[in-house]
Image: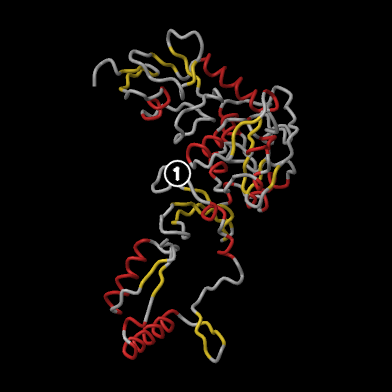
Amino acid sequence: MSRENIITINGQEFKFEPGETILDVATRNGIHIPTLCYLKRASSPTGACRMCVVEVEGARNLVASCSTPAAPGMVVRTDTKRVIEARRLNLELLLSSGNHNCLVQDLNQDNWTDFQLDSLKIKEHENICPAYGRCRLQDLAIQYGVKPRFIPKKTKYPVEENPFFIRDFSRCILCGRCVQACNEIQVNNAISFGYRGADTKVVAKGDYPLTNSDCVFCGECVQVCPVGSLVPRSVIINKVLPNEVKKIRTTCSYCGVGCQLYLHVKDNKIVEVTGVEDVPPNYGSLCVKGRFGYEFVHHPERLKKPLIKENGKFREAEWDEALELVANRLKEIKEKYGPDSMGFLTSARATNEENYIAQKFTRAVLGTNNIDHCARL
């Protein structure tokens, strides 16, 4: 690579590829620049939050590193006094943009660097934000030692509920991540920015509630929301805090794609599902079933053992008994009526590997080609 493709960040020289931004180069080389609105998989950054501002030698103003292309010979400083003061002011303005108390004023926490509260005290507080402990705005406010300095703005938009998550406009910072996730990653085009100035909000078409809109409730917006504006209902109902859950990685069981997800488990019960980011095939994205359709796991009527029908009634059986019964019956039918008297259906709920085994069993073991799949259209 030519000497021309060199950028200097905090005194260190780094190579860059054409099209990379300052943030791309810094992140790739382990230099942390804080962000709020930046969404990795979006086609273009918005630069809306201004948290990623840096100082570029020769530039009059600070620039947003997420949207500023790296240029040959560029000299960048990410942690000067001017940069820190700008980020602190941005945080103060964001904290005053709505209901972002983060428990600081209510619980009289003067020292944010030692901001630690036990779970019981947090839960007993009426104004607890459902994103407490996993809010990016809160994390940055603690990191930079910022407390609300301006009078918070009151929103005129009421909280909107749907069967899957809550939309609290008083906590929205208008970062645009949900809009980008909906329009550019999932390509549902269900939401966008509406109105102007102080009345700006994220709206569906016609400003209808999401239940009356084109939203398919994939929850991509919930996954990328950095604050407490979009929160799953289960998190609010169960008053779930991050330190109370265990994240278990698994594969979604709804189809054969193999989407990777985290089960957030509390007291041996699933209370939330999130996509595993930066991992194929889904890279954090999930459908409505994968993200919200997990209540069947704990349903009291869920079958947990095979059932064998005797005298018109079902009884529970162990797997060995059930498999032996099925094997014997298939053998009897094959011997009496021939292999083509049987037909088999596999499921889109199974993995591709399981469906492959099913067709091999049908053709090689039973000797028939009568096999089909419920998702074959």
> Residue at horizontal 44%, vertical 20%?
68
Q: Which of 32 and 219 is in front in this view?
A: 219
- Compared across the picture, whether 250 is left or right of 267 comes to left
Taking 158 as reference, is 268 above or below it? below
Along the line of sight, which residue is nearer the eye, 25 or 325?
325
Quadrant (top left/top right/bottom left/bottom right) for the N terminus: top left
Q: In which quarter of the image is residue 36?
A: top right
Residue 348 spot, x, y in % from top left? 43, 63
Outermost residue toward the front?
377
- Residue at the limit of the structure toward the left, as seen here: 1
Element marked by disc 1: loop
Q: Considering depth in this image, is 229 or 81 the residue closer to the camera?
A: 229
Q: Is residue 141 above or below residue 330?
A: above
Q: Specify the amino acid type for callout 1.
A: Glu
**Who is closer to the viewer here, 26 or 4?**
4
Q: Is residue 26 left or right of residue 154?
A: left
Where residue 326 appears, as percent x and y from the top left, is 40, 83
User: How many marks on residues?
Assistant: 1
Percent position of residue 45, x then y: 48, 27
Q: How crowded is mark 1: few (under 14 residues within 10 Å), some or many (20 or more)?
A: some
Q: Residue at x 68, y 41 (%)?
A: 208
Coloring applied to the structure: secondary structure
Circle 1 sits on which residue? Answer: 277
The relative height of residue 376 versus residue 317 in the rendered view (above or below) is above
Position of residue 34 measured from the top left corner of the image (x, y, whole percent):
50, 28
Tell me the quadrant of the picture where the C terminus can be found: bottom left
Q: In the rendered view, does 364 fall on the left or right side of 125?
A: left
Seen in the image, is 212 located left or right of residue 304?
Answer: right
